[in-house]
Amino acid sequence: MFNRCYTALVTPFKDHDVDFEALEKLVEFQIAGGVSGILAVGTTGESPTLTWEEHNEVIRVVAEKCKGRSQSIAGTGSNNTRETMESTGHAVHVGADAALLVDPYYNGPSSLEIRREYVAPVAKKFPQIQIIPYVIPGRTGAQLFPEDLAILHKEFPNMSTVKEATGDIENMRRTRECCGEDFVILSGDDDMTFTMMTDPVIKASGVISVSSNIAPQAAQDMTTLLNRGEQAEAEKLMVALKPLFGIVTVKTQEDTPHGTVTCRARNPLATKTLMAILGMPVGPCRQPLGKMTKKGIEVVLDAARTVWRNNPEILKPVADFFGVDIEARLNDESILAGLTYDRYLGPS
């Protein structure tokens, strides 16, 4: 049974390579925060930019560090079933508890094809591991429908959970209707978790979270309270965490010689930028993700300063674990050097 908070862990880089020493520190921070589990190399872990060798090594490290302490989920999805088979086999070999299969992106198979040609073959070949479809049509251009989820759930005992990131409440309710009460729905969007867990039809069990990279204990506590039915106390934590939820994606309006454009800093850029500001060992994103604009980084700083001012206990575990001065770092302009583009305009 998957419930409460699972952190979609960022992948730290140093000198263009995966920083495995930093990775182990980040895993230890999550375990110290009491999260239910850790997802290795999901979208937040920049999976599209990792080689399969890097991908599998990150999964191995996370699975081994989590063993007996926290659940581990391996991001093994692809738009190529053969690759997914190989990566899931590796995840089984190194002892991961589950494999997350994102809907196949770009080539965009139908829901029928996703079920028959992708999820079902993996679930059938690896009955010893839980298979979690990850439905996020905004990223993939494809979607496994609730009706096909229900067929998979009935056919395979190891297919009883979904990461739901459609942003569509009616789709979530339809998932519960089709799949039944014993099916686990996990939120794939931090800012929808409270709604999904309190909706009397959806009845989500928890979240695979981005913001818990920074605030694992608070995110775990919020979902624990919701599972206990202590909604009022959970709502207080939700309000405290809301500024962090708001920076998973940051949109700003930037001026160009041809007019104003929307600049969208997508996950994990803003979260990873804030982690670097706070003194967590994450390094940069890997190209083509780059840096934030000055307007974007001000949005990130405003969110962090709001949390620190109103609910410092949310960020205090970062200060204690990594030995940093949060107040000083949030107000040190020199730390921003290298984290932001000098200007939107100008030569590349």
Image (cartoon, rainbow, N blue to C red):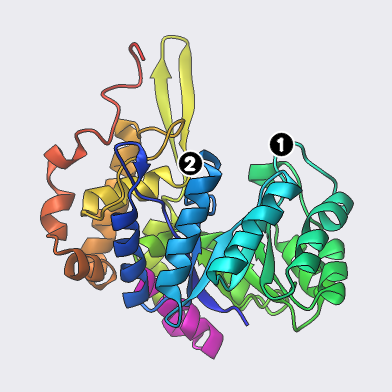
| Residue 85 visible in the displayed image | yes
**Does 191 sit left or right of 13 as displayed?**
right
**Does 311 sit left or right of 158 as displayed?**
left
Q: Earlier in the sequence, mark 2 or mark 1?
A: 1
Q: Residue at x 24, y 71 (%)?
A: 317
**Does 320 sit left or right of 90 as displayed?**
left
Give the x, y percent position of residue 318: 24, 65
Q: Residue at x 55, y 70 (%)?
A: 96
Q: Which residues are magenta?
A: 216-236
Residue ID for mark 1: 106
Q: Quadrant of the C terminus?
A: top left
Residue ID for mark 2: 266
Query: Magenta-highlighted stretch: main secondary structure?
Result: helix
For this rendering, which residue is in front, 229 or 286?
286
| Residue 47 visible in the displayed image | no
Question: Quick check: 28 above or below 247?
Answer: below
In the rendered image, which quarter is residue 126 located in? bottom right
Give the x, y percent position of residue 184: 68, 76
Q: Quadrant of the N terminus?
A: bottom right
Q: Residues within 10 Å of mark 2 (few under 14, many from 20)?
A: some
Magenta stretch encompasses residue 85: no
In the rendered image, which quarter is residue 335 located in? top left
Magenta stretch encompasses residue 228: yes
**Residue 330, disc:** none
Q: CA distance from mark 2 to mark 1?
A: 18 Å
Q: Residues within 10 Å of mark 1 (few under 14, many from 20)?
A: few
Q: Which mark's residue is nearer the viewer, 2 or 1?
A: 1
